[in-house]
Image (cartoon, grey):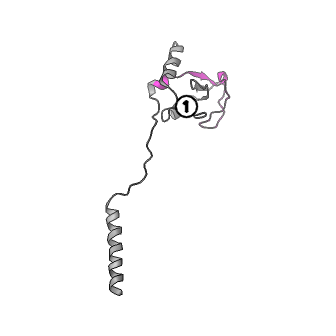
């Protein structure tokens, strides 16, 4: 009976060591969306806090957008954010932080055509 127990322990030890030699297969989160480039961000409309249409709370930092602060408006849904907050978010995600509407390339280029600057 002792011999069977020793063989069993050896098999368990061997099995655990052989699994650790191979890298464990951890689930990997694939990034399906890529954020906007710096040139695309520059094409999005800029405004000030006093000209925002849909509220003055930045959903990224949860702070009020003061009337004199620069803001960015997401084309399509017209949600507004602090300029720096929006650029940080949109450089990593190509969707609106509030409604999750995906920014389409034609929206980016259409908004830059509207802005003659």
Residue 85 at what x, y percent from top left? 56, 33
Residue 98 in which image quadrant: top right
Specify whether residue 56 is painted magenta: yes
Query: Badge 1, how many Cα within 10 Å: few under 14, some, many 20+?
Result: many
Asked whether, in this view, residue 55 is left or right of residue 17, the answer is: right
Residue 100 at what x, y percent from top left? 57, 34
Residue 94 at what x, y percent from top left? 50, 32
Q: Quadrant of the N terminus?
A: bottom left
Specify whether residue 19 is painted magenta: no
Secondary element under disc 1, as helix, strand or loop, is: helix
* Residue visible at 48% across and 33% down in the picture: 91
* Residue visible at 45% across and 34% down in the picture: 34
- Magenta stretch: give its range: 40-67
Residue 25 in which image quadrant: bottom left
Q: Is residue 43 visible?
A: no
Q: Is residue 27 visible?
A: yes
Per the image, the residue denoted by label 1 is 86
Q: Residue furthest bottom?
A: 1
Task: Tell which of 15 and 48 is nearer to you.
Answer: 15
Residue 114 at what x, y percent from top left? 54, 14
* Residue visible at 45% across and 46% down in the picture: 29
Task: Tell which of 91 and 104 is nearer to you.
Answer: 104
Magenta stretch prevailing secondary structure: loop
Task: Tell which of 83 and 22 is nearer to you.
Answer: 22
Question: What is the number of callouts on the image?
Answer: 1
């Amino acid at each position: 009976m002792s011999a069977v127990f020793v063989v069993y322990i050896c098999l368990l030890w061997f099995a655990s060591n052989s699994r650790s030699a191979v890298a464990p297969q951890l689930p990997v989160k694939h990034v399906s969306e890529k954020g906007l480039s710096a040139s695309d961000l520059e094409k999005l409309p800029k405004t000030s806090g006093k000209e925002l249409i849909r509220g003055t709370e930045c959903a990224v930092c949860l702070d009020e957008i003061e009337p004199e602060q620069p803001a960015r408006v997401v084309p399509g849904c017209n949600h507004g954010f602090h300029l720096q907050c929006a650029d940080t978010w949109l450089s990593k995600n190509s969707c609106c932080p509030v409604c999750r509407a995906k920014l389409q390339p034609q929206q980016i280029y259409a908004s830059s055509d509207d802005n003659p600057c």
